[in-house]
Image: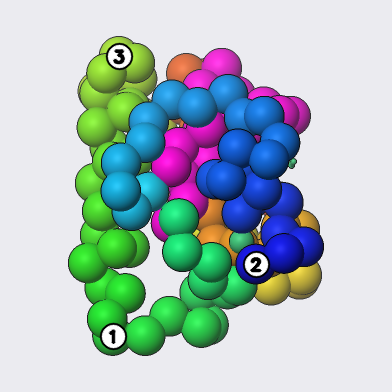
Amino acid sequence: MADCLFCKIINHEIPGSIVYEDERILAFNDINPQAPTHVLLVPKRHITSLTDLRVEDDQLVGELVRRAAAIAKERGISAGGFRTVFNTNRGAGQTVFHIHLHLLGGRNMKWPPG
Ligand code: AMP
Ligand code: ZN
């Protein structure tokens, strides 16, 4: 999508600090990290919000979650604990309207989140 920041990172029109890439998904470091590990995992196909998911996207979302767990394991933050978050729509803090899974870890987390 033309005006989407994450589509521009996916298309290499703006730089991203990429940690994983395959045909369907891209993972890159968050520019404003909230934990020692803060990676964003996105589908390469533009999907605006979780509220737009279709049944055909089930596998894609599963891949995002499974890849987040794999990156956590690679970074040695898996056993200690990590957090995976989709912020959906403005009230929940979504600022970029291309779905992204936050992977946060490497420090202790509080609950509930703000
Ligand atoms: P959200 O607020 O859930 O929509 O998350 C958007 C995330 O994108 C925030 O954590 C931002 O720090 C991050 N972000 C914004 N611009 C960039 C960028 N150019 N590269 C990497 N992460 C970004
Ligand atoms: Zn997009």
Q: Is residue 33 left or right of residue 95?
A: left
Callout 2: SS: loop
Rendered image: mark on residue 55:
1
Q: In this view, does 95 lie to the left or right of 73?
A: right
Residue at position x 33%, y 53% in the image: 24
The answer to which of marks 2 and 1 sits earlier in the sequence is 2
The amino acid type found where label 1 is placed reads Val
Give, as a single range, the part of the protein colored magenta: 26-43
Count of all numbered marks drawn on residues in the image:
3
- Residue 25 locus on image (x, y percent): 37, 48
Q: Is residue 13 magenta?
A: no
Reading the image, the residue beneath label 3 is 76
- Residue 53 locus on image (x, y percent): 43, 80
How far is the residue under mark 2 from the one under mark 1?
Answer: 21 Å
The amino acid type found where label 3 is placed reads Gly
Q: In this view, does 7 lie above or below 32?
A: below
Q: Is mark 3 within 8 Å of ligand 1?
A: no
Q: How crowded is mark 2: few (under 14 residues within 10 Å), some or many (20 or more)?
A: few
Q: How crowded is mark 1: few (under 14 residues within 10 Å), some or many (20 or more)?
A: few
